[in-house]
Amino acid sequence: MTAALSERPKLSRRFRLQYEEAQSRWVLLYPEGMVQLNHSAAEILQRCDGERSLPEIVAELEQAFNAQDLAPQVQSLLEEGQRRGWID
């Protein structure tokens, strides 16, 4: 069973979110390698600073991209990120 998401998700200290010019994409760097992110995942993870709540992250994304009902997708990515150790 997976632990519940933090009220204010934060990127794990073991990972660094960075834009890679050579690949023209955002990546998560960690000592053993790198995870290439799609645009949506990068937008979500950039907001995981331990300050914003899940509803605040969703609201920012919905406003930034003029979209609605993003909560299920954002929560799904964060749960997967937590499972993989990206999110504390």
Image: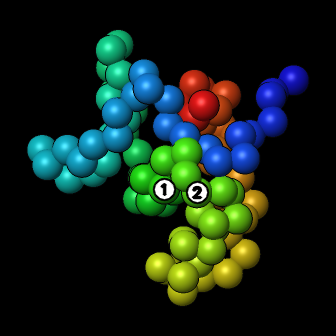
11 is higher (above) or lower (below) than 64: above
Classify residue 36 as left or right of residue 21: right
Which residue lies under the disc numbered 2?
A: 52
Other-residue count near label 1 (Cα within 10 Å), few / some / many at <14 / 14–19 / ≥20: many
Numbered label attached to residue 47: 1
30 is higher (above) or lower (below) than 25: above
Q: Label 1 vs label 2: CA separation?
A: 7 Å
30 is higher (above) or lower (below) than 9: above
Query: Mark 1 or mark 2: which comes first in sequence?
Result: 1
Observer-nearest residue: 24 or 82? 82
Other-residue count near label 2 (Cα within 10 Å), few / some / many at <14 / 14–19 / ≥20: some
Q: Is residue 84 visible?
A: yes
Residue 50 percent coordinates (x, y): 55, 45
Residue 61 percent coordinates (x, y): 54, 71
Name the residue type under label 1: Arg
In contact (CB < 8 Å): disc 1 and disc 2: yes
Q: Is residue 76 visible?
A: no
Residue 86 percent coordinates (x, y): 53, 31
Name the residue type under label 2: Arg
Residue sticking out furthest to the left: 22
